[in-house]
Amino acid sequence: MTMQETEERGGRGTEKLMTGTQAVAQAVRLADVDVTAAYPIRPYDGVMQAVAKLIADGDLDAEYIVAEGEHSQFEICKHASAVGSRVFVGSSGVGWMYAMESLAVTPSLRLPVVAMIGNRALDDPGAFGVEHNDAMSVRDLGWQLNWVENAQECFDATLMAYRVAEDSRVSFPVGIGVDGAFITHSQTLIKIPDQEMVDEFLPPYDLGDRLLHPDNPISIAPQANEDWVMEIRKQTDDAAKRVKGVIQEAHDDFKRIFGRGGDNPFFEEYMTEDAEYVLFGMGSLSLPAKVMVRRLRDQGEKVGFVRLKWFRPFPTEEMVEVLTRFKAVGIVDRDYSYGSPKQGGVLFTDLRAALYDAEVRPRLVNFIGGLGGRELTPEMMDDMADTTKRAAAGEDVPTVRWIGVRE
Amino acid sequence: MTMAPGRALQLDPIKSIKKAPEEEYYQSGHRTCQGCLSALPMRLMAKAAGPRTIVLGTTGCMYVANTTYMSTPWVVPWMHTQLGAAGSAALGTSAGLKALMRKGKIKDEPINVIAFCGDGGGADMGLAAISAALTDVEYNLLIFLYDNESYANTDIQTSGQTPWGAVTTFSPPGKKHRIMQRRWKKNVPGMLAAGHPDTKYIASGTPAIPVDMMDKVRAALSAGGPTYVHVLDPCPKGWHYDPEHSTELGKLAIETGIYPLYEIKEGVCNFTGTTRQIAQGRRERKPVREYLEKQGRFAHFKNQDFAYFQKKIDEMWEQWIIPGVIAFSYGGPINITSEKATVRNNNVERDNASWAGERPGHAHEELEGDGGLDREWRDDNMMGDPSSGN
């Protein structure tokens, strides 16, 4: 297929001004979700308002249950998934944590639940704004997690989530991290493809011989204890290792059919070609970071930005290949990890581990900022870039620094 | 639009044990205690429900001791669910089936969905989820609570269903406090019936009276919509008695009036079996002491404890508006101001359409006439006008 044809195909459908949550709802509609369950918490709940309206208007044929708490909300969807229904669910902040028991068992059950996480600070004290600790709390459990940059990516990531989650080689839940307020509630113009294109990308959900149905009378998740739990965990680990390959395949198809998605599914490089140092982060902080890069580039600085899209699976080999090109990397964490090895953020700690085996390691500095929904401004990015530049030059800079905090 | 996925399987009453189906859908393979009257209701429930059934089981005895990897006793499909998730597991399963049938993705047929839970999972942690499930009248499901009056699987701890004064590992009698369990047992089926008027069937039973229990399961499954059956299961380990006395204790619970048998069908409550005889004055309640003294968990009771217990049972029978079911009396008198009496009773004819989503206001249905939306919803913030009745 020529590039022109791809572009023409990518142009099929409609263009609309939408918030991130509305964009997710449009993908839910085109994925023909069968069951969804709602419970209110800001900022994710906009998506359930949009889904409810789609159902009320007859644009989506799905069972819609308003649960009495997030634990039930996620259990309802987990069990609907086990009988062969495609499901959509989501939450934010402490709501996500209230569902934690269900979140823990869903990947072990290998059920491809797709959830939107409208990232929100964990109370107390109360805060509506974004922090990534809510979604990151499930990072070790088998949830596949990605973070998006804008409403278009909300839409695209949701379709990708179903494709990857339901692939029989994977069969894991996928969580889409959407920065609260900055993306959930910000409108951008997005392309919505027609149903035919989505159907070409996303095959029907088929659990095969794991379907719970009287015609297939299996017992799911009996008491296994030490006799078998390790073998089952190992199978889950083997599946986790297959996810990256499936994401790559899905990305290639996505790009072929919709003509979008970037060079690779795992990360985005922004003006990094001859960069000596870069900032690194996830989600909406890419916007001020990119402003910073453009401004400093105009001043002759060899600075760039790398945005991670898939946090689980963590693209270790790719990160080693990309980030070892630079002298220093400044990791911007919109999260915290109290008492962690370097008292830094979660992303920083993971990236340090990923780069440990690299032959040449860049210097890594960590910035914790934008917590509780506080804005990360281009000026703060300038400040972080300056520290990273000094680290690249071999200067002694703090390994971890909190940004924009009143003393 | 077809509403057929909402059809409930119609199951006739069994009436006598000899007429019970021979087929077993819960077989050997479990490793429950000798004399366990929580395993028996699983067998009876599965037998009553038949092969077109999906069973969801919460954590508890009937998970841990009952369903072991590689030796499952379940012939019908079975899935574990979380301790407090009986209601949501049943909802999700039923909703999933309904969506797939409506959308033509699987064969359109009635399938029973039963979620069981223990008293800890159902009456404590999972009560909110069960309550939510009982309000979602579009889904066929049965919540089956097996009540052995403690967290028996984790070594007999006090639950919201543990009787007053009973010894558990969380309520041991000591030198200073003889009675450590000072809460009166929650009246769960009565509470659920009182609070969920659209639920078509709620009943109490016991495996000690198996035909009655099986017929209640069948009535619940046939009623359609969300339903609830509570069964009292004597537990040799938790109640401290010889396993051979399990059935006898189940019967004594009925005969002493501590645990009444009843069913609430379409908003009408009727006692069943021995309880019916007691309620009709054809049989005396036995003193509750006869029941309590046979159980080691009450071995520390003094006369005053037995007296207190009997007083509470007497109150339940003599002062509750419906004995053993609705836990209060009415201060009256009733003064109905409308011209037409609207109090529901047996003699009022009610137009109960089948539950299956065919009443106005249910999703996926064209709304017509008075049941329809009489105004547009505001799109800006999705706020509805309460006066529209929707």
Image: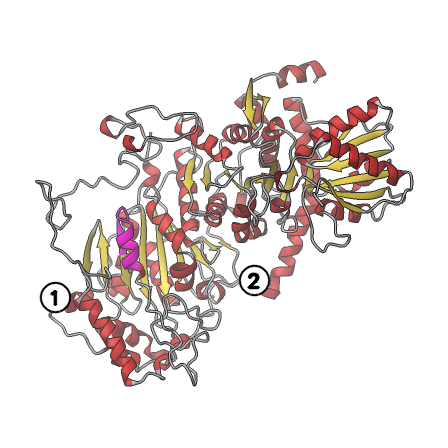
Q: Which residue is mark 1?
A: B280
A360 lies left or right of A377: right
Residue positioned most to the right = A394
Residue under mark 1: which chain is it in? B
- Nearer-the-camera pick, B219 or A216: B219
**Of the residues shown, which amino acid type is indicated by label 2?**
Ala
Residue A199 horizontal/vertical position (percent): 55, 27
The C terminus of chain A: image quadrant: top right
Q: Which residue is mark 2?
A: A224
- For the residue pair A237 and B109, the one nearer the viewer reads as A237
Residue A340 horizontal/vertical position (percent): 73, 54
- Residue A193 image-quadrant placement: top right
The question of residue A191 being in magenta is answered with: no
The chain under label 2 reads: A
Which residue occupies 26% across, 77% down?
A: B308
Q: CA distance from mark 1 to mark 2?
A: 50 Å
